[in-house]
Image: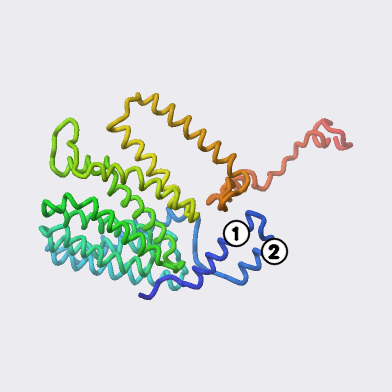
Amino acid sequence: MKKAYNENWIENLHIQQTASAWLSKNLLTKEQYEQVKALFPEQFYRPGIFVKIGLFFFATIACSFFVGFVSIFFIDSGSEIGFSFLSLICAVCFTVFLEYLIKNRGLFHSGVDNALLYAAVSAAMVPVFMLFENAGFWIYGIVALAILIPVILRYADLLATLIAFGVLFTLLADLMMKFPLGKALLPFSVMILSVVVYFMAKKNKSLYYQDCQKVLEVLSLFTFYLGGNYFVVREGNALMNDFSLPVSPQISFAPLFYFFTIIIPLAYIVTGLRKHDRILFIIGLLAFAFSIFTYRSYFSQLTPSQELAVAGALMIFIAWAAIRYLHTPKHELCDEPDGRRKLANLEAILVAQNLGQTPHENGIEFGGGNFGGGGAGEVY
């Protein structure tokens, strides 16, 4: 599918960001960085985060006013068909205006284009809910994926990627829970689908979908672990079967889920270190912490204060040992921070706004002799 944003500019933007990171590490000089920007130009409109948020809310309000204006012409037709037709008209108008702004104004996830995209998708989904009120969730899910997948392929939007991922797994759960055996196989189905999504995302080599790829990797790693976590499976089983017991009953294949709860975080951590995959490593640490919580929920004999004290001391010791061991790089690993701060220029902006004002002229200069002989000059 043809992409909405200029791919060459996206590649140049990635090169500029890499050069900026190298500049912050003193691997490039300022002159070399300026040469990189000149050789690989991009003309996207990319405001700061606060301006982007403001533009998003402004565009959302403008879309609401547009819907209200168009609805005046359909005020007499209160039928569901008339309202659905109104929604489709709004979806088309939002999409056309979105394409115009991207092509002629160079917007790139600047807030306005995000708001127009979400408004268009929402308006396109309204007729489905209006005309198929009593349909099953699987119908809504399939239609939503049919709309969201082309949106992701064309605009590479992160929120659309997140929603599509959630719809996909909710659709899987809805279909599996329709028959008794499906409830028992649901954890394994979630794990299998997570593996499929993860490796499909890993196959992407395009910078255009780089952020979407990271979102899918993170989400699929989380769902794979949660699908095999003993606590999630046991409590989820009690919830699905409406057990009202004080303690949830034991589940089938409990030793297998014990194994998953322990081995998956360790596999994430080891693989992340070996492949220098920061996403995999961090998620492994988070999963390991949740595994400790799982063990504590059923087997711990310590009080919460004792657990916090032991966990804090252990984390401090591990962090100290790791920093000491990796102070000299080993196995292509070190304790130096990587990357640059996302808001590195925030301090400079605040200083410029508060201290960079043009000073007001003041005729009273103590020490200059301009008033009452209070200085050392000869002017009285």
The local crowd at label 1, few if under 14, some if 14 to 19, many if 20 or more residues have their Cα within 10 Å, is: many
The quadrant of the picture occupied by the C terminus is top right
Residue 50 makes an appearance in the image: no
Residue 99 appears in which quarter of the rendering?
Answer: bottom left
Residue 377 makes an appearance in the image: yes
| Residue 87 x, y percent position in the rendering | 23, 65
Disc 2 designates what residue? 31
Which residue is drawn at the image coordinates 32% and 32% (left, top)? 296
Classify 120 as above or below 226. Answer: below
Residue farthest toward the right in the current orientation of the protein = 378
The local crowd at label 2, few if under 14, some if 14 to 19, many if 20 or more residues have their Cα within 10 Å, is: few
Residue nearer the viewer, 157 or 249: 249
- Label disc, if present, on residue 80 of the rendered structure: none
Residue farthest toward the bottom in the current orientation of the protein = 2
Which residue is drawn at the image coordinates 29% and 60% (left, top)? 164
| Residue 135 x, y percent position in the rendering | 12, 60
- Of labels 2 and 1, earlier in sequence is 1
Residue 21 appears in which quarter of the rendering?
Answer: bottom right
Classify 314 as above or below 194. Answer: above
The quadrant of the picture occupied by the N terminus is bottom left
| Residue 54 x, y percent position in the rendering | 43, 53
Seen in the image, is 328 located left or right of residue 111?
A: right
Identify the element where label 2 is drawn: helix
- Label disc, if present, on residue 20 of the rendered structure: 1
